[in-house]
Amino acid sequence: MMIRTIKGIENDKWMKLKILAAKRNVALGRLVEIMIEDYSNRADAVWNKILSGEKIISEKEAEEFSKEIIRLRKNRGFRV
């Protein structure tokens, strides 16, 4: 067993974390693992929803936007 330090955590937050572990009858390290897994899964779900969701514009509109952006960048001296 190794001792780890969490910098910047307030005493009240540390106590809440310990209480959560005790209520669920798990070790503090295991609770942190569960919280990290849950956070990662929720973050992935949000990105999947964004990337796989309904398109806001059509492919044709996207092409038109792309062409217009390239034209504006050339006119303003930016890389294309």
Image: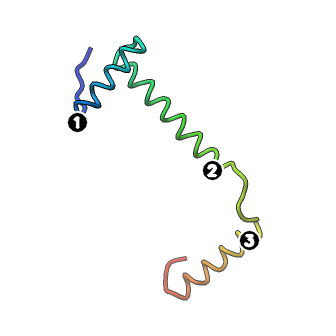
Q: Is residue 33 above or below residue 49?
A: above
Side of 25 relative to 8 (left or right) = right
**Residue at the image point whose x is 48% and y is 34% from the top:** 39
Q: Amino acid at mark 3?
A: Glu
Side of 61 relative to 39 (left or right) = right
Residue receiving disc 2: 50
Give the residue at the far bottom of this rendering: 75
Residue 36 drawn at (x, y percent): 43, 30
Q: Toward the viewer: 33 or 74?
A: 33
Side of 61 relative to 33 (left or right) = right
The local secondary structure at tag 2 comes to: helix
Residue receiving disc 1: 7
| Disc nearest the viewer among 1 and 3 | 1
Q: Amino acid at mark 1?
A: Lys
Residue receiving disc 3: 61
Side of 62 relative to 28 (left or right) = right
Q: Earlier in the sequence, mark 2 or mark 1?
A: 1
Residue 47 drawn at (x, y percent): 58, 46
Q: Is residue 2 above or below residue 14?
A: above
Q: Toward the viewer: 42 or 65?
A: 42
Q: From the image, which quarter does the C terminus lie in?
A: bottom right
